[in-house]
Image (spheres, rainbow, N blue to C red):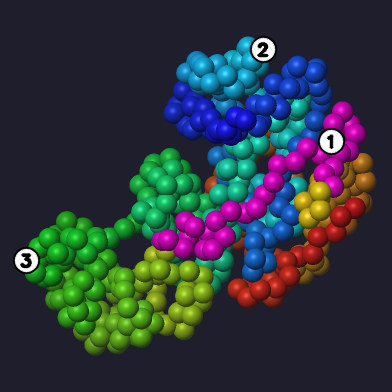
Amino acid sequence: MSLPIRLTVMTSSSTALLTDHYELTMLSSALRDDTADRPCVFEVFARRLPDGRRYGVVGGTARLLDAITRFRFDGAELDHLAAAEVVDDRTLAWLADYEFTGDVDGYPEGELYFPGSPILTVRAPFAVGVVLETLALSVLNHDSAIASAAARMVTAANGRRMIEMGSRRTHEEAAVASARVAYLAGFTATSNLEAGRRYGIPTAGTSAHAFTLLHDSEAEAFRAQVDELGSDTTLLVDTYDITKGIQTAVEVAGPELGAIRIDSGDVGPLARQAREQLDALGARNTKIVVSGDLDEYAIAALRAEPVDAYGVGTSLVIGSGAPTAGMVYKLVEVAGRPVAKRSSHKESRGGRKGALRRFRETGTAIEEVVYTVDHRPEPSEHDRELQIPLLRAGQPAADLPTIEQSRERLRQALVSVPWEGLKLSHGEPAIPTTFL
């Protein structure tokens, strides 16, 4: 019995793409029995939301589309497959010429999704579509999980500034992807400079405790930072004693100090004490930034405190307890014939699908309608179709949304959710799904 392996396929721009052993097994078998060219429809959806969640946020679509258009097997990967005897010569020759030429539709980034939502629809010959399963799921499951967690945190922050600071708590590439979808979800900035370079996301940061410890005194450390960055910088005041640190910070930077950061302790009471001390020192406009193991629940608990901004790291990049969105990639149609998996608790619904969301006249969302394309319901005045063209004949569709447009899409979507759907407590999905 051969062991399952995962092949990392590198493009010319050194972006890692994934396929799995079993996908190539299916490909090889389909090429042998002449089913490889059958026109198929694959669908990405989540059977359920992670425990405790009332909505999901689609993230990673733009990253996935870019990866699909560049998905290739180069000579080194083909040599490995041949040496490992993973596939036969006919399959190797087919992979050498691989290029995705199908069509993709789906929910745009920043859109909400619910159980059964057809988040991505891939139309292609079986062989062309089947090798994308791991790639599609690895991107969408990760990025949607992070985007969903980030959106809950942004809602809990209630308009206060949010800084993503999780790069040191995850894989180096996951850190960049997490920073991107955190920004999509409403975070103000990231500390990850590579995310800033790749995606134009605002970056922000301050010094760590090591910088204070490097100097002979806290005052010397603060003075060096202010001399370099100006008095509008953010000084970390809890390396030693917070009360003394705040006093020293204002003495060095003056009452126009931009902000202080508190990274440890019971940040609620500490923020209140810091605000009182700053005001007494004349630094009434100095902001208070808190960080240190924050999640949406901790942020919500701090809503009444004098906190101006939050720095969130670990909880964000692990999806705040839901590190994957639980999406699956299933074959739902072959040559125009609906097909469906019937396994207990893992059922799928056959046929290519679309979806529309129904709204009250006031703009409140009330229902997600998922339908097979042959039974599309007549839309009403306030209905909105959810899928958009993403790829046509393997190339990006026209007018794909920018990340700024996706941020606005999510903001509007969350405004449309009934208020109980934004609660952090367990409950039913914010919007019920009807299948036609």
Front residue of 101/409: it is 101
Residue sitting nearer the eye, 84 or 116: 84
Name the residue tied to disc 3.
216
- Residue 153: where, in percent of width, then height? 52, 67
The residue sitting at the left extreme is: 216
Callout 3 environment at 10 Å: few (<14), some (14 to 19), or many (20+)?
A: few
Say if 53 sits above or below 279 in the image.
Answer: above
Q: Is residue 316 visible?
A: yes
Residue 333 is marked as 1
Q: Position of residue 93 (x, y in %)?
A: 63, 12
Query: Looking at the picture, which amino acid does disc 3 mark?
Result: Asp
- Residue 148 on image: x %, y %: 59, 59
Q: Which residues are magenta?
A: 313-342
Q: In the rendered structure, are the residues bearing label 2 and label 1 in contact, judged by CB atoms less than 8 Å apart?
A: no
Assign a secondary structure to mark 2.
Answer: helix
- Residue drawn at x 24%, y 68% is 236
Which amino acid, mark 2?
Arg
Mark 2 lies on residue: 90
Q: Return the residue nearer the eye: 23 or 204.
A: 23
Q: Residues within 10 Å of mark 1 (few under 14, many from 20)?
A: many
Query: Callout 2: few (<14), some (14-19), or many (20+) C-alpha neighbours within 10 Å?
Result: few
Q: Please state which amino acid type lies under the numbered disc 1.
A: Glu
Of the numbered discs 2 and 1, the one sitting upstream in the chain is 2
Q: CA distance from mark 1 to mark 3?
A: 69 Å
281 relative position to 379: left or right: left
Give the mark nearer the N terminus: 2 vs 3.
2
Q: Position of residue 161 (x, y in %)?
A: 43, 66
Residue in the picture at 9% in, 69% down: 217
Q: Is residue 408 visible?
A: no
